[in-house]
Image (spheres, helix red, strand yellow):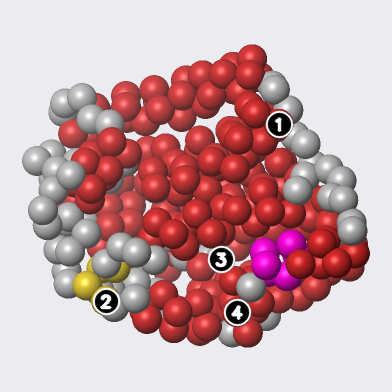
Amino acid sequence: MSARLCAAAWNIVGDCDETYNYWEPTHYLMFGKGFQTWEYSPVYAIRSYAYLLLHTLPMRLYGLFATPNPVMLFFITRCVLAFACALCEVYFYKGVCKQFGNNVARVMLCFQILSAGMFISSSAYLPSSFCMYMTFLSFGGWFLEKYEVAIMATAASAILGWPFAGIIGVPIAFDVLLRKRKIKLFILWCFLALVTFLLPMMQIDQYYYGKLVIAPLNIVMYNVFTDHGPDLYGVEPFSFYIFNGLLNFNAVFIWAVCSLPFVVVYNWLMKDKERGLPCWLALSSMYIWFLIFFTRPHKVS
């Protein structure tokens, strides 16, 4: 908690998206004025106001007791984000304890606390940070065999945050549907997730855009099915991802990439049969993410 609150207090706003796509429209929602980027134009409508309104809740709560001061609202929001991140990390830690043991979980927690990437993203007002929170919850729920939590958190990540983050939930779906055969549970909670997240989002966006909008679908259509979507602001070479992985997680990034082969070799040498959730399945989300996004040109920040 202290590490995340330090990030809330001292971390800079290092992403232009955070300023113009989130703080500016939030300022509009709170004070009636603010810049509008093209993403919020009804012509494109690839951003949802539901995500913004979710973050105005602590601001409005503060406004009930004191005069809303923009500087105070800025830091209160960042502290709330840091607090939410810490809670999600604790839940994930508990899941790792159950699935892989206390020693692994403690080492993991130390790496997270000392990670520059976690310091930057833990209090950032960005959908990618929200997706990170939800990923902690979904994997924590998966490891704790709380599949309802895993499904709802994955859905929240993809619908309210960033639709491409739903790819991380593919191994969870594989485990629930094919290994555990909990088909009814999966269908029921997927339906509840759509009712809980997608329908209110559509109603909110219809109010602000003046027309029917499904923002997650618009993001996918724009970035995948247009000639200029992901390349709009230029591209970076493949090495971009390698450098970022090393900057954010240093040597841990290399160990993570090599983890699956070591696990397979260890189990083969020790003749050790995995119990519970197989390590290859638990690690597969990372490799699926690498396979898809490392092969795509990244937008220049």
Which residue is more in the foreground, 56 or 22?
22
Quarter occupied by the C terminus = bottom left
The residue indicated by pointer 2 is: 236
Q: Residue at left 84%, top 57%? A: 100
- Between the C-alphas of marks 4 and 3, the distance is 22 Å
Mark 1 or mark 2: name the one nearer the start of the chain: 1
Q: Secondary structure at mark 4?
A: helix
Q: Is residue 57 left or right of residue 294?
A: right
In this view of the protein, which residue sits in the foreground, 95 or 123? Answer: 95
Percent x, y for residue 179? 71, 31
- Three-letter amino acid code of the residue under disc 2: Glu
User: Where does the magenta region start and end?
Assistant: 259-264
**What is the magenta segment's predominant secondary structure?**
helix
Q: Is residue 48 left or right of residue 121?
A: left
Find the distance from the CA under tag 2 to the CA under tag 4: 21 Å
Residue 32: x and y in percent read: 24, 48
Q: Position of residue 136 (x, y in %)?
A: 64, 52
**Mark identifier at residue 122:** 3
Q: Give percent across and percent down for residue 113.
A: 69, 75
Query: Which mark, residue 254?
Result: 4
What kind of element bears circle 3?
Answer: loop
